[in-house]
């Protein structure tokens, strides 16, 4: 019961974040991205491939995988896999496949529209402005000219990987509701990553003082 309540709260908060982000995206105050045509350098094909690989086997990607694995094991999700080492291994491999599929689709399809899969930090403006920018770039991405537009490749990657993942997940995790929840948590994870990219350099500077 508690886990369902937490999930429902998470989905409600995600919906609020997405609506706020889209509202900000069309607001005149946010019409210009911090990555302007003067300082934004579009991603290359080689960098797209590197981004996919780094998200799967890079140190940060592997670390996030360990945290996600520990969280799911603690909540025994999905329950068929149990909390033993076998379940730990299945969850970790499943998460790695999930990320690889999602990133590959996003980077591949995104190239058609010139979408930037990486997070481009604002690094300036008020804390509130930067946090709002991190939120709206969950659903928007830089194009080759630096402007922000819908991240179609990201949407596709988030949907496709969750549908494909149903092929190996146990029955309790493949209902329509569970698939939607995984898509929602994927976007929440992107928001967390954006906020970390945006503010971690500031935090490190303060810690070093």
Image: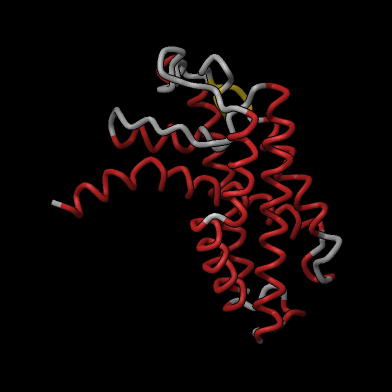
On the image, the x and y values in percent for residue 117 come to 59, 35
Q: How is the image coloured?
A: secondary structure
At x 82%, y 61%, the residue is: 175
Q: In this view, does 200 lie above or below 77?
A: above
Q: Is residue 145 above or below residue 6?
A: above
In the picture, measured across the screen, residue 86 lies left or right of residue 131, that is: right
At x 67%, y 60%, the residue is: 96
Point out the residue furthest to the front here: 46
In the picture, measured across the screen, residue 168 lies left or right of residue 57, that is: right
Q: In which quarter of the image is residue 91?
A: bottom right
Point out the residue furthest to the bottom here: 84
On the image, the x and y values in percent for residue 17 come to 52, 41
- Tally the marks: 0
On the image, the x and y values in percent for residue 122 come to 38, 30
Depth check: give the residue in front, 182 or 33.
Answer: 33
At x 67%, y 62%, the residue is: 95
Quarter occupied by the N terminus? bottom right
On the image, the x and y values in percent for residue 186 come to 62, 51
Q: Quadrant of residue 93?
A: bottom right
In the picture, measured across the screen, residue 172 lies left or right of residue 120, that is: right
At x 80%, y 67%, the residue is: 169
């Amino acid at each position: 019961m508690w886990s369902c309540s937490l999930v429902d709260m998470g989905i409600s908060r995600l919906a609020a974040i997405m609506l706020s982000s889209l509202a900000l995206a069309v607001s005149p105050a946010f019409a210009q991205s911090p990555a302007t045509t003067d300082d934004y350098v579009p991603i290359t094909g080689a960098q797209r491939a590197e981004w996919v690989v780094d998200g799967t086997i890079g140190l940060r990607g592997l670390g996030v995988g360990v945290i996600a694995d520990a969280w799911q094991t603690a909540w025994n999700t999905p329950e068929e896999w149990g909390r033993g080492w076998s379940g730990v291994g299945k969850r970790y491999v499943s998460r790695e496949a999930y990320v690889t599929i999602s990133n590959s689709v996003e980077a591949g399809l995104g190239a058609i529209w010139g979408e930037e899969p990486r997070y481009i930090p604002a690094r300036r403006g008020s804390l509130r402005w930067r946090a709002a920018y991190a939120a709206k770039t969950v659903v928007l991405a830089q194009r080759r000219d630096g402007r922000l537009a819908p991240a179609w490749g990201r949407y596709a990657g988030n949907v496709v990987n969750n549908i494909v993942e149903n092929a190996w997940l146990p029955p309790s995790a493949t209902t329509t509701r569970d698939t939607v929840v995984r898509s929602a948590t994927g976007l929440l994870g992107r928001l967390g990553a954006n906020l970390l990219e945006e503010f971690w350099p500031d935090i490190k500077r303060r810690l070093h003082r």
